Amino acid sequence: MSAMSDYLENKLIDFVFRGQTYTPPTNTWIGLLTTATNDANTGQVEVSGGAYARVAVPSTLLYWSGTQGSTNTSISSGTSGTTYNVNSITFPAPSGANWGVITAFGMYDAASGGNLLFYGNLTTPKTVNNGDAAPTFSASALSIQLDN
């Protein structure tokens, strides 16, 4: 289950209801967290070191499903309010340091720093150590829901 950050909620309210400009990112960057975060984006600890880097996912019809569950290039027409990654999202392999126990993910508008857009806890936390295989969200494993 995912949640939207206060930052994105405010941007969308201003855009839809208040006529303010909002330019969505051309990529979203998926990050791994060793602690949970919240709407205010406080208290989170993102993995660092050991060759870790957020992974860019283009904000296009080819990389995120339609709300009807379609993985093709048609626009959303479903009622689920949910999208998911169409392709696998693979992080660099950990090298030189352990990453720790990954408990959550964050979706950001920048490769580092930036603004948290969405976040969620993993169904099953995963310990990632130096030399392990590159962590991956397989296709359809990362879902973002707007309609709760």
Image (spheres, rainbow, N blue to C red):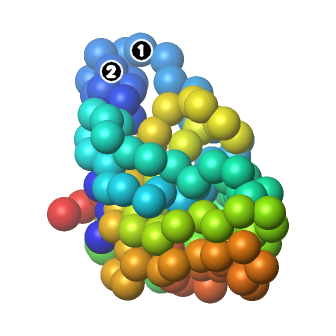
Q: Nearer the viewer, residue 4 or 11?
A: 4
- Determine crowd level at label 2: few under 14, some 14-19, many 20+ residues with C-alpha closer than 10 A: some
Q: Residue 80 location in percent, x, y?
A: 31, 73
Q: Nearer the viewer, residue 126 or 121?
A: 126
Q: Quadrant of residue 114?
A: top right
Q: How many marks?
A: 2
Marks 1 & 2, CB-CB < 8 Å contact:
yes
User: Can residue 10 be seen at all in this image of the molecule?
Assistant: yes
Q: Nearer the viewer, residue 138 or 19?
A: 138
**Relative to residue 126, is residue 121 drawn left or right?**
left
- The image quadrant where one finds the C terminus is bottom left
- The residue under label 1 is which amino acid type? Gln
Q: What residue do we see at 50% from left, 32% from top?
A: 115
Q: Which mark is residue 58?
A: none
Spatial CA span between label 1 and label 2:
5 Å
Where does label 2 land, which residue?
Answer: 14
Q: Quadrant of residue 73?
A: bottom right
Q: Quadrant of residue 17?
A: top left
Q: Which mark is residue 20?
A: 1
Q: What residue do we see at 50% from left, 24% from top?
A: 22
- The residue under label 2 is which amino acid type? Asp
Mark 2: secondary structure: helix
Q: What residue do we see at 30% from left, 70% from top?
A: 1
Q: Outermost residue toward the left?
A: 148
- Determine crowd level at label 1: few under 14, some 14-19, many 20+ residues with C-alpha closer than 10 A: few
Q: Relative to 78, does residue 133 appear above or below in the rendering?
A: below
Q: What residue do we see at 40% from left, 68% from top?
A: 103
Q: Residue 85 location in percent, x, y?
A: 59, 73
Q: Relative to 117, does residue 80 appear above or below in the rendering?
A: below
User: Can residue 107 be seen at all in this image of the molecule?
Assistant: no
Task: Mark 1 or mark 2: name the one nearer the start of the chain.
Answer: 2
Q: Residue 12 location in percent, x, y?
A: 36, 32
